[in-house]
């Protein structure tokens, strides 16, 4: 980023408490430990820390100046000191200023599951016609939004933002400071229901992405009655679903999915109907920006799943599918269906706890066991106190573990070599440890 002192003051309406000179170009840093040349230190507050405690350290490390929400914090050695009422809001204002200066087409993506996959597909396709910049992994909250926008190269033409949330109002805030041209709602499910209380509230929270969508923009949303009922956006809206009359010739194979959409054949190198659904959002966004169908097809075929998202591995004589980045009832059912429809026997599921499901969390896990009874010829291994509920009433051979201890050794001793194994759990279960142990001699 390249910002001037006046840019920062004007963006935040900051009060200048001290100014002894400023460089022509400035950068914003929120980490006192990694100050580089011409950095301005901006202290943020968290639940367990206050960045104001590290202002002196930032100055010793070379910060040219700092922003503060405490007028009493005036330290020697600062080229300038700026006061704002709220440093997080100032961070958002600075990021918005810089984004408006670059003025890229902005695509915002949210959903209970699949938003990161859709973002990565979107980036792969848009790169066929534009210079793009995208949210890194996990950068989908207020701070991540700022970091993404402020790290944008000056020649960026399309900015792709992933937006997550913990409660109502949070995606609206992200929308406010990014003002998207295109917004995508991948889906709404039960993820975070423990915080939001109902699927209706989750849908409302996701639809906040259109709160500051430009009037001449485009909202692309999963076609469900719930999203249609809560969507308040008055501009162009395109509802997309697998039931579309424009979609045909679906072929699901190991490592790939093929389909025809709007009279064009497409291939994605990942399995599952849910990934075809994700591709439909991307295709329609790309068509809106004028990309040819040939370029869209080329970009989709270049897409590769990222780590822990349907990552294909050959380990210890097993065909491992690592989809353990996150899990909720909808994404787990989709993963199970895809796995069992594309992988030949013998097959094994290693399923772990799903988080943030609220007071009915045990019932949501039991529902997975009921869902599994629709299928034949599989082994089930559960890991965690909640995942154990998946074995209640299940007709398949099942083994439960309270934690990951011993899981890898059990697999080696009891799961036939050559088996396909799906690993799926919420991130806090750290299934990568089991997979690593599985590969150890």
Image: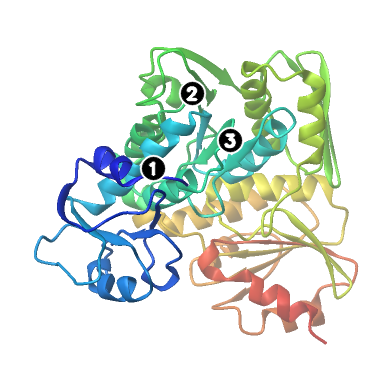
Which of the pair 157/378 is nearer the observer?
157
**Horizontal side, residue 188 vs residue 3: left or right:** right
Q: Residue at x 66, y 84 (%)?
A: 406
- Looking at the picture, does residue 250 appear above or below residue 316? above
Which residue is outermost to the bottom? 441
Q: Is residue 197 visible?
A: no
Give the residue displayed 86% in from the left and 61% down from the top.
Answer: 346
Helix, strand or loop at label 3? It is: loop
Spatial separation of the CA atoms under disc 2 and disc 1: 17 Å
Q: Please provide percent x and percent y for residue 427.
A: 54, 63
Q: Earlier in the sequence, mark 2 or mark 1?
A: 1
Mark 3 / mark 1, whichever is N-terminal: 1
Residue 411 image point, x, y percent:
76, 77
Vertical comparison of 431 with 102: above or below: below
Question: Is disc 2 placed on a helix, strand or loop?
Answer: loop
Inter-mark Cα distance, 2 to 3: 15 Å
Per the image, the residue denoted by label 3 is 156
Task: Name which residue lies at 75% across and 14% down.
Answer: 262
Q: Nearer the viewer, residue 361 or 58?
A: 58
Residue under numbered circle 1: 95
| Residue that numbered label 2 is attached to | 181
Does the CB distance between marks 2 and 3 fall below 8 Å? no
From this view, report whether residue 127 is shown above or below residue 215. below
Q: Are marks 2 and 1 in contact (CB under 8 Å)?
A: no
The 10 Å Cα crowd at callout 3, few under 14, some 14 to 19, many 20 or more, is some
Q: To which quarter of the image does residue 409 belong? A: bottom right
Task: Tell me the quarter of the image containing the C terminus.
Answer: bottom right
Dot 2, crowdedness within 10 Å: few (<14), some or many (≥20)?
A: many
């Amino acid at each position: 980023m390249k910002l001037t002192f006046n840019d920062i003051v004007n963006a935040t309406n900051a009060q200048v408490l001290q100014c002894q000179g400023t460089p022509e170009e400035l950068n914003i840093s929120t980490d006192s430990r990694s100050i580089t040349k011409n950095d301005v230190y901006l202290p943020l507050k968290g639940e367990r820390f206050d960045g104001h405690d590290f202002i002196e350290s930032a100055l010793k490390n070379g910060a040219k100046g700092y922003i503060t929400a405490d007028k009493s914090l005036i330290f020697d050695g600062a080229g300038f000191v700026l006061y704002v009422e709220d440093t997080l809001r100032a961070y958002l204002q600075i990021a918005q200023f810089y984004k408006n200066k670059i003025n890229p087409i902005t695509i915002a993506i949210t959903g209970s599951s699949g938003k990161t996959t859709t973002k990565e597909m979107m980036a792969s396709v848009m790169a066929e016609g534009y210079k793009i910049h995208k949210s890194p992994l996990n950068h989908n909250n207020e701070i991540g939004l700022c970091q993404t926008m402020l790290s944008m190269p000056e020649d960026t033409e399309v900015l792709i933002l992933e937006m997550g949330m913990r409660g109502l109002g949070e995606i609206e805030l992200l929308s406010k400071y990014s003002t998207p041209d295109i917004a995508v709602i991948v889906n709404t499910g039960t993820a975070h229901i423990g915080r939001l209380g109902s699927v209706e509230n989750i849908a409302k929270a996701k639809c906040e992405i259109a709160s500051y969508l430009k009037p001449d923009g485009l909202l692309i949303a999963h076609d469900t009655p719930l999203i249609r009922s809560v969507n308040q956006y008055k501009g162009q809206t395109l509802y997309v679903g697998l039931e579309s009359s424009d979609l045909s010739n679906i072929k699901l194979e190991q490592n790939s999915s093929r389909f025809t959409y709007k009279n064009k054949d497409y291939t994605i190198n990942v399995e599952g109907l849910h990934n075809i659904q994700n591709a439909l959002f991307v295709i329609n966004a790309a068509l809106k920006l004028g990309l040819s169908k040939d370029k869209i097809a080329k970009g989709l075929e270049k897409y590769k799943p990222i780590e822990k998202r349907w990552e294909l591995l050959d380990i210890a004589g097993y065909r491992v599918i690592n989809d353990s980045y996150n899990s909720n009832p909808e994404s787990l059912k989709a993963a199970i269906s895809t796995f069992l429809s594309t992988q030949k026997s013998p097959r094994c599921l290693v399923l772990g706890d799903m988080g943030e499901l609220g007071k009915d969390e045990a019932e949501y896990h039991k529902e997975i066991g009921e869902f599994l009874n629709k299928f034949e010829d599989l082994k089930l291994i559960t890991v965690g106190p909640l995942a154990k509920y998946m074995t209640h009433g299940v007709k398949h051979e099942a083994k439960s573990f309270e934690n990951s201890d011993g899981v890898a050794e059990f697999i080696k001793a009891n799961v036939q070599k050559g088996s396909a194994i799906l690993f799926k759990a919420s991130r806090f279960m750290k299934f990568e440890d089991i997979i690593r142990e599985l590969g150890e001699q």
